Amino acid sequence: MTSLKKSPLHERHVALGAKFAEFGGWEMPLEYGGVVAEHTAVRTSVGVFDVSHLGKATVTGPGAAAYVNSCLTNDLGKIGPGQAQYTLCCAEDGGVVDDLIAYLHADDDVFLIPNAANTAEVVRRLAEQAPDGVVVTNTHDDYAILAVQGTHSDDVVAAIGLPTGHDYMAFAVADHDGTPVVVCRTGYTGERGYELVVPNAAAVAVFDALLAAGEQYGIVPAGLGARDTLRTEMGYPLHGQDISPEITPVQARSGWAVGWKKPHFWGDAALRAEKEAGPARILRGLRAVGRGIPRPHMTVAGAEGTPLGEVTSGTFSPTLKKGIALALLDAAVVEGDQVTVDIRGRQEAFEVVKPPFVTVNVRQS
Amino acid sequence: MYPEDLKYTAEHEWVKAGEEGPVRVGITDFAQDALGDIVYVQLPEVGAAVRAGDACGELESTKSVSDLFAPVNGTVTAVNEALADQPDLVNTDPYGEGWLLDIRVDDEDEVAALMDADTYKGQLDQS
């Protein structure tokens, strides 16, 4: 077994009393003071996540952006330099190899943030077909990524001298004690917030500065446990669960991240055909009527016990104080339907709802 | 962390024997910390017969679910109703307000045979 990679902030997490877990080959903080408290801090004030396990890659050279746009699903032509975009890397059959954020620095310079476990594969696919002059480089281990999330995120980021207030999904490159830091208005929590891409050497200094600046707002370091409950409350898909090589964006209702008017992207023929015919199964939200807490792979059934599909992500919602899930269900199921989830032999009642499960604050100005 | 007046099981539960009558059962500080924030507790019905080592309920945290194993053979005489609304009592006060259930044991010797605090701590140190 290969040893797990560690964040440049690992020693800080140890000192903060973190419990660790493996995420995509990295040993990362799962929680510090408890998932619910960290979740609540992000929803009500501010928290900082170390998400350095996320991948990083560059695509550079003449025509780099055009090349990326011919591969990944979303239309990079809709944004300009200084903006980022959620996009998907699909296989030819329409399955999702990965979902990622593309930062458009310039027509010849695109920065990608794939998931930890999929970075090597995304880089391999992009490098394999890259035209002459376009270079794809895996920079996975060169940067830390810190996500500052919550209503007070602007106060905290501004207090350490970094730019704030830019539009949702816009980014700025700023100087922090001589180190260039990318500050993007994005996140995975549903709250207003920023993700900072920091060269490794400056990671500890930036992390310490954020915690110190956030003290007056009750900032907490938040682990990937809270990140999962926060994103599930928003209905944001997680690759490997809600989208995967077996689950297409058409099924996962991620068609908004597909540039349908583009002439070509990986998987376009299969996805266009599926969209035209209508998907056989659709990712829906489930909210518990009672106290049951759904978990991935539990069976969802209709009134007469007819199997309708299965849970892809499920957890306890700290905000709603009840079970919530994303579930891949027969396309005939619609919002408002009552279904049951088989929770270890108990048939628990759930209502089919449209995510998000909580109020969205991500675009608030 | 591990009160001397309690008995312990390998499944990280504690048992407190009263003067007479039923024993009280909960999970240890080690167990509540390992589980993380407990958000739902499923307990057996009052009156149910439980068998030592068998699952008789569930403790669910934000991330996972764990079985609750009966530490002894007996009959459930009470369950902690407060946990329905405040499951986090198991985290904040595992030996007090976060107790789980009371069991009238079939054979008092079963309780006496459980680990004492020092033995339990020794087992934790080895793991």
Image: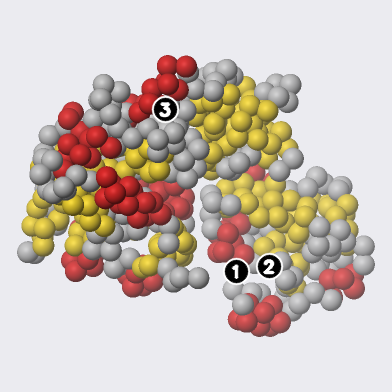
Left or right, B62 with reference to A358: right
Choose top left, top right, bottom left or bottom right for residue A79: top left
Question: What's the residue type where badge 1 is placed?
Answer: Phe
Q: Which residue is mark 3?
A: A270
Q: Quadrant of the N terminus of chain B?
A: bottom right
Q: Find out whether the residues at labels 1 and 2 contact each other: C-beta distance under 8 Å.
A: yes
Instruction: Tell which of A353 and A321 is nearer to you.
Output: A353
Q: Residue at x 61, y 41 (%)?
A: A297
Rendered image coloring scheme: secondary structure
Q: Residue tagged by mark 2?
A: B12
Q: Would you call the spot at circle 2 few (<14 residues within 10 Å), some (14-19), or many (20 or more)? A: some
Distance between the alpha carbons at the discs numbered 2 and 3: 52 Å
Q: Is residue B36 left or right of residue A302?
A: left
Question: How far from the left and from the top, in percent, is residue A104?
Answer: 16, 41
Residue underneath mark 1:
B30
Tag on residue A153?
Answer: none
Q: Position of residue A193 (x, y in %)?
A: 25, 44
Same chain check for tags 2 and 3: no
